[in-house]
Amino acid sequence: MGFRPRRSPASGVEQVTTEQTGAERLRSRRALMIVREPAVAITIMVIASALAVFVVYPLYMVLRTSLTTDGGLSLAIFRSLLSRSYNRRPLANSLKLGLVVSAMGTAAGFIFAYSTTRVDVPLRGFFRLVATFPMISPPLIMSLATILLFGNNGLITRQILRGAVDFGIYGFRGLALVETLAYFPTAYLVLSGVLQAMDPSIEDAALDLGASWWQMFRTVTLPLAIPGFASALLLIFIESLADFGNPIILAGNYTVLATQAYLRITGLYDLSGGAALAVILLIPSLIAFFLQKYWVGRRSYITVTGKPSAARTRRDEPWLRWCAFTLCLILTGMILLLYGTVFIGSFVTLWGANYELTLANYNHVFRVGWNHIRDTIFLSTVSTPITGILGMVIAFLVVRKQFPGRRALEVASMLTFAIPGTVVGIGYILAFNQPPLVLTGTAAIIIILFIFRNMPTGIQSGIAALQQIDPSIEEASYDLGADSATTFRKITLPLIAPAFFSGLVYSFVKCVTAISAIVFVVSARWKLITVAVMGSVENSDLAQAAAFCVVIIAIILAAIGIINLLVYPPWRARSTARAATVGTSGTPGAIPPGVAGGQ
Amino acid sequence: MNHYSVELQSVSKVFEHAGARWERVVAVDGVSIQLRKGELLTLLGPSGCGKTTTLRMIGGFEIPTRGEVLLEGKVITNLPPNRRDTAIVFQSYALFPHMTVFENVAYGLRMRKMSANEIAERVGRALTLVGLDGMERRPPGALSGGQQQRVALARALVVEPKVLLLDEPLSNLDAKLRAQMRIEIRKIQQSLGITSVYVTHDQEEAMSLSDWVAVMNSGRIEQIGTPTQVYARPATRFVADFMGRKTSFLPGAAVGTDGDEVMVSIFDDVLPFRAVPDILPGQSVELVVRPENVDVVAPGHGGFPGRVVHAAYLGSQITYEIAVCGFTVTAEVPNPEEREIFTRGSHVGVVLRTRSIHLLPQ
């Protein structure tokens, strides 16, 4: 991130044309610009080195470990791994699961998005609320509920059907169901954003020109939503590949990469084998990520028609309304069934045998699991504000400042979203178990992992929000005598408060629900709730696991409330707070409202 | 004290985009400006001519690739915006939407660490000046476009900058308000005696406001002069074409001089025009014919014979497009009610008011 020094005359070529002097002069001028803002330059350098150490270096370690045998560079580990069909299967399984889940999740997400944004269905708000449940709860809660209902000793398998049907949930079918429900909200968010941005008058124009509803839907709505579909498919594919919590308890013999890499390291102590599996997992994830970001992301049809139509027309054909309503009802019904099961399960004495209600599980959770709860809250509370502010600072630098390496900084800071947690976890134990930087067993490694893993969402919404804000608002602040830091604090941050809020909430939720990367760096000294849930499930203490899950959700809801109070203090003058989102020329009226409630 | 208030010494700005293709865009090319205290200069030109970039270099938002920017004799080329004594009124106003009107105007004073009493007093004065008393506690979103404009102006004026920069400040207002605000801006500017640089693409605005108008084209200043000079005595064909509503160009040849007159042959006639220094007998010239330089008469009453191609009645005037010897001349005839109105296809006589027609050497 250094400044390019002026080429010294000694090293330069003697004949210098005017063109060259111009370019040279330009470069030196630009360097001066950064020198004039030392605070900005130092911030950039600090962030860049942090990204290098905590994002790039661990990744490099994974690659190096998987490519080194006996001190030399070779593909031997991959060759021996892939020579056995037992090892090839996880790759095929992961890909198959990813494809199926992304297809089903996108379909479910689209139905939900279309119904709630474009159709006049009853209970829209309720459906939207339920769609956010999977986003604010640990993914493995779905698996837990599925086991409680359909497992060998499950309520439906045993008590209702008396063992007549074997659902075979341990394996592909169970995973596909659970991951679809856990990840369809991603598609819902992406697609409802796309559908909301679509001007309804375009659809009206199609109808006006003689198209039937179905023709209009097929020739106008769907084609305009295609970039959204592609994004949703790829994002869910990435999430499914990276999923660790569900497969670890529900996969059975259906081995997937994320858990196999973990088991190879913790079970067989085969670090290089685990690293190699991690690399194999990394490749499809990265391909999907770059496709999404740089190919699909640029192909969005932003339907701008000059005049913003205030009234968003919703279709109200009866058949459409009731179809949409029924589909939404089925989907939310399934989600509520699963969450309800976990909630009730947390009060049951012994699931499958004794359904008497009791508080013993909570008693256990708060007695034995108290350390887990305390550590989780502490570590999340420390890392969340750092994550949030750092995310906004990076978004600010990337959007508003010109400096060499800006693109690299952006990519590195977003990279952790694309890298499956298992890969990051393996990278961290490889990188920070040995000098020069020994962090294993400390709180620091967990906090750092949280920060760099949870930042991308904040950065993304920060960038989106900043791009909506007229840069001359910030220029006005410089012009009136404020420096970059003051401008960021007094102008930028208040204006992107919704993005800041969503970054904070997302970060906290991910801290509390994270499992994939974190299982590698937890220690006897620092414990986390999700790890406790995993342990309880492994010991078949399903009721305790359920109680832990309920506690996690309670913590998250409380945290969202507190963050809301901190970001939007009720004692602030209401008129000005409102003004920030009321749009007139020059004001950022277009801050996407979805960003706040999104996560 | 013989410094210029604002001075640009052959300033250039090259943007380099290292995107998919390596692009070099010369936005501003060797622009020099000298402005005395209290003067208002307008940078006028079509979009993309470099006028906003020039303004932003004075404000410190762009660093010139070449050349220097001076403020009251001091080189400020490399000074960041927050450390130079300039204030901008942005095209979008750029009001802070999360602050009240008062807080918006006070922002610059707070950055200068003034006492609360002085801030209150100065903000009050600035708001009175722009006619916004009593609006202190409103959020900018609750104001009309014209009021937001005034807040932006007050916010820039309150810090008492050495130079006030206005970047198309009126482009977001409707036509009536625009005309009213430009008079107000000029009055305030003159009463405070504040040196100002004003960017616009609206020539009427430029002419009505300015001491000096600089007409820009592709990064260069084509002509800098008083409003009268750039309109009546354009230096280049670009300026002649850009100024005025619809200028017609007719070919001619200078045939001789007669005192302060030059004789020009046009079509099949020879007419006397006001002399232009560079034009010598024998030289080809171009006549810059403004619509108001043309009179339309009934055929047989003199002038070149022509035929009306198009006629538009505008109430206060009537606009004709007339084909004359293979050229199209636009004419505006005032008080149509008192004259004969010609319809499309009519044969007419076209009379040139040669005293006010400018000549450009070919």
Image: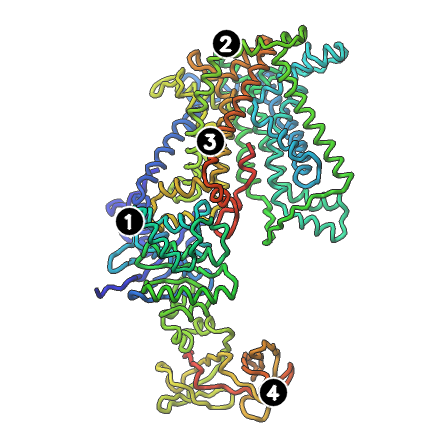
Distance from Cα at disc 4 to Cα at disc 2: 104 Å
Q: Which chain is disc 2 placed on?
A: A
| Residue B298, image quadrant | bottom right
User: Observer-nearest residue: B71 or A217?
Assistant: B71
Q: Quarter of the image containing the C terminus of chain A?
A: top right
Residue A170, how many percent across, how many down?
65, 15
Residue at mark 3 to residue at mark 2: CA–CA distance: 33 Å
Give the labeled residue for mark 3. A455
Instruction: Look at mark 2 in the image and give the residue it sits on.
Output: A367
Circle 4: is it few (<14), some (14-19), or many (20+) Cα within 10 Å? Answer: few
Closer to us: B46 or A472: A472
Q: Does the CB distance between marks 3 and 1 fall below 8 Å?
A: no
Q: Quadrant of residue B122?
A: bottom left
Report the residue at 36% width, 43% height from top. Answer: A484
Identify the residue position indicated by label 4 in the image: B340
Q: Amino acid at mark 2?
A: Arg
Residue B298, disc: none
Between B96 and A82, the one lying in front of the other is B96
Q: Amino acid at mark 1?
A: Val
Marked residue chain, label 3: A
Q: Percent from the top left, x then y, of residue A116?
A: 66, 37
Left or right: A109 with respect to A453?
right
Q: CA distance from mark 2 to mark 1?
A: 75 Å
Label 4, secondary structure: give it: loop
Q: Nearer the viewer, mark 3 or mark 2?
A: 2
Whole-number angstrom distance, CA of label 3 to CA of label 1: 45 Å
